[in-house]
Structures are given as structure tokens and as C-alpha cells.
Image: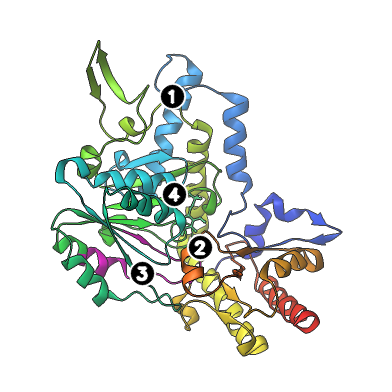
Amino acid sequence: MGLDVNKVRTDFPALHQLKDGKPIIYADSACMALKPQQVIDALVAYYTEYTACAGRSPHAFSLKTTRLYDDARKDLARFINAKNPAEIVWVRNTTEALNLGSHCLSLEENGKGTIITTSESHNSNLVKWVRLHNLGKIELKIMEMPLTGMFNLEEFTEIVEKCEEGNFLASLNHTSNVTAAHIPETEIAQIVHERDGILQLDAAQSFPHRPIDVQKMEVDLFAASMHKACGPTGMGFLYGRYDLLEKTEPLILGGETVSDVHYPHDIKLLSPPTKFEAGLQNYAGAIASGATVEYLASVGMDKIQSHEKLLSRTMINNLRETLGNKIHILGPENPEQRAALAAIDLKGQINPHEVAILMDEMKNIFLRSGFHCTHAFHHEKHLDVGTLRPSWYLYNTVEEVNIFVETLQEIFDIMA
Ligand SMILES: Cc1ncc(COP(=O)(O)O)c(C=O)c1O
């Protein structure tokens, strides 16, 4: 049986409200996903029933927080098939996870290493590398991506072959938030590992939408945000192979990261993941992240993935039928190869930002316009006014997708 979208929708209180007497069509999940009651309950329970820190005080509230904080890590490890819960580090978001992951490239030990990324990378997987490059600390290779989003394995292999063996990190977008394309991660892992490099995936747009098995993919580092997966804001994680994390320098140091300190210069760092989680943590967020993956697993990631394929097919086919050459949809032609989002170039006929405002005013359709934090890609492809981006998730219906397409056509009829 497929996903029962009507049942799923009952879990999301935000969808039960009306705006101007009409339902809301939420098409901005690539930015921020809505939250099910199960996740909200987990957050509220922490704040109302047992607010305390984990791992320090011996009282009942703290013991409960410690247990649930650890359980959430185990739940997430199981969800992505990590070998060991200690391979999960809680951080604020994908951005922080990617920054931390880059510390696996031991620059001090090995001298100037290389980071490889692509031109369609989100700013969180680009800006830091450009900065390090501009400061002379790393070599940076940015592989140019076409508008179709298709990953060129041959070109990538050539880049990898020019890197110093064992001293490079490929930090790649697993699923693009503009082209909606997925990269062939397993082939990429083989190419990277043949030269003893590290593969880090920016999984902000893949983790929420399809089954993940980090061991099967043979990825070394995997970074994602919980807020795009129906989870709490301000929570994300870095999965890292344990042996890599052991060698990695933390981003932030302080309380909880050490087992002992002696005046004046002696500190003993703890093992992963504790050495990376400095200071008191977002316990409510971590515990609610456990509830998040439990929720997604209860719906079924396979079912979520096939439901999104249906939404994607419906959107792409209907847009082509109704608007044809008036628009250009970035990414693969074949809807089966796409995530359930589309960055749409309106070819200068209407401003995408105005369309996004009109969509809200006319039909309560909430979506995003602009550069989607991929300024470099948009500029390089001469998409200087940005694109319009609807993005769909498990709680969206085919009817909603159809309303979006009809409304875009209506706006074109009025304004173009
Ligand atoms: C592909 C991709 N990478 C990274 C990010 C950054 O996520 P966060 O802002 O949660 O760190 C996003 C968010 O839009 C994204 O779409």
C-alpha cells in the first residue's frame, strides 16, 4: 500500500488552519518542513516535564534527559544505518555539520589539502571553502555543473587524479536544492577512496526524502538538518566514520569536551561524539530529533519517496503541458530522476519574487523565490533575477500540485 496522505496530514497541525477562510498549500519544505504533533509533543514534554541537562547531575530529571538524549542518537544511527551511535554528532544544522566535517582534512598535519565541490553547491558547502582558499589555506576545485544537474563522473575522476593522494575531501551535494538532481554517490565514493580521499555529502535535501544507508553508500561524512525532515529547528547532525572522527579536531571546545584539565596546559579530550558537543546542548531538540526519525520510520521512507515521485511527475508533466517553452525547469528532463522540487526560470517575463507573493495572495500557496543560497550557480547560468521554487513533501497532495500549476498559468495569463 502507498502513503495515505490524508492520514499523514492529520498529524500536521499547521495544515489544519485556514488563511482568509481557505486552506494553506505549503510548498516550501526544501527550506523548512512542517512539524507533526509527535515531534511537537516531544519538545513540549522536555520543557514541561523534565527540563535538565544530560550527563551531569544525579537527579531524576537529569537521568531522564541523559537516557532520552542517548536514545535519540541511537534512533538516528539506526535510521541511517550507522555502525555505531558514537558516529552521530549533534550540531545546529547542515551548515555546521559541513564545517565540522571539513576538519577531517588535517591541514596542519599534511599541509595544504584540496577540497572538491561543485558549482551548484549551496552556500553552506561553498562559502567556507572559498574563504579558506582565499586565505591560502587549501586548494579548491569547483567542478562546473550543467543546468541539467547531471554529474560528470569522468570529469570528477580527472579532478580527483590531480589531487594529492590521501589529502583531499570531496564535499558534494547529495541532492541539489535547485536542479533536484541526485548524484551517483556510490560510484563517487569508489573514485574518492581509490585515492584515499574523504567523501562528505551535503544531505540537506536527501536525508528527509529517501531511505539512507551510510554504510552501503560507503560515505565518510554525511551532514543534514532535522528541520527539513519534519524535525525541530536548530538541530542537525554530522555522521562520520568513527576512525575519522577520532582524528578530527572539534569546531568548538569547552565544558563536556574533556575528561580532565590540569593547570596550566594539560587537557584530555573525550572520544567522539562527546568531544564535539561543547557546553550544555539543545536537549529538547535532540530528543525531538529522535521522535522525528521515529515518525518518518513509522510512515516509511520508501512510501515517502514514492509519494514524492508522484508529486514530482505530476508537477513536471503538467508544467510542460501548460506552460511549455514559456518557462525553463532546471534539472533533469526525466521526472523519475528528480527530487520533488523545481527551480523554475520564468525567462524574464515575470519577476519570481512577485509571483511568490501573488501565489500566497491568490491561493495561499507558500513557496520560495530567489537564489536559494546558490548565488554562484544562478549568476553563472545568467539567472540573475533568481528562480521560483515549489518544493513538496509527504503531506502534499496531487491536487495541491495541480493548483500550483494552474495558478502559475493564471499569473502568466495576467502578467506576461
Ligand atoms: C542543499 C542544501 N545544503 C545545505 C543547506 C543548509 O541547511 P541549513 O541552513 O539547515 O544549515 C540547505 C538549506 O537550504 C540546502 O538546501
The residue under label 3 is: 183
- Disc 3 or 4, which lies upstream in sequence? 4
Q: Which mark is drawn over residue 54?
A: 1
Q: Residue at x 50, y 71 (%)?
A: 306
Report the side of 399 relative to 328 (left or right): right
Q: Which mark is drawn over residue 94?
A: 4
* Foreground disc of the pair 2, 3: 2
Q: Which mark is drawn over residue 275?
A: none
Vertical relation: 76 (above or below) 345? above
Q: Which mark is drawn over residue 375?
A: 2
| Crowding at mark 2 (Cα within 10 Å: few <14, some 14-19, many 20+) | some
Report the side of 259 relative to 302 (left or right): left
Q: Rounded to the nearest whole Å, what is the CA distance between mark 1 and mark 2?
A: 40 Å
Determine if residue 249 is in view: yes
- Residue 324, by quadrant, is bottom right
Vertical relation: 9 (above or below) 412? above
State yes or no: discs 4 and 2 in contact (Cβ < 8 Å).
no
Percent x, y of residue 347: 62, 80
Residue located farthest toward the front when viewing the structure as drawn: 135
Q: Rounded to the nearest whole Å, what is the CA distance between mark 4 and mark 1?
A: 23 Å
Vertical relation: 375 (above or below) 401? above
- Disc 4 or 2, which lies upstream in sequence? 4
| Crowding at mark 3 (Cα within 10 Å: few <14, some 14-19, many 20+) | some
Q: Secondary structure at mark 3?
A: loop
Q: Amino acid at mark 1?
A: Ala
- Residue 370, by quadrant, is bottom right
* Residue in front for this viewpoint, 169 or 273: 169
Report the side of 14 relative to 130 (left or right): right
Q: Amino acid at mark 2?
A: His
Q: Amino acid at mark 3?
A: Ile
Percent x, y of residue 386: 59, 69
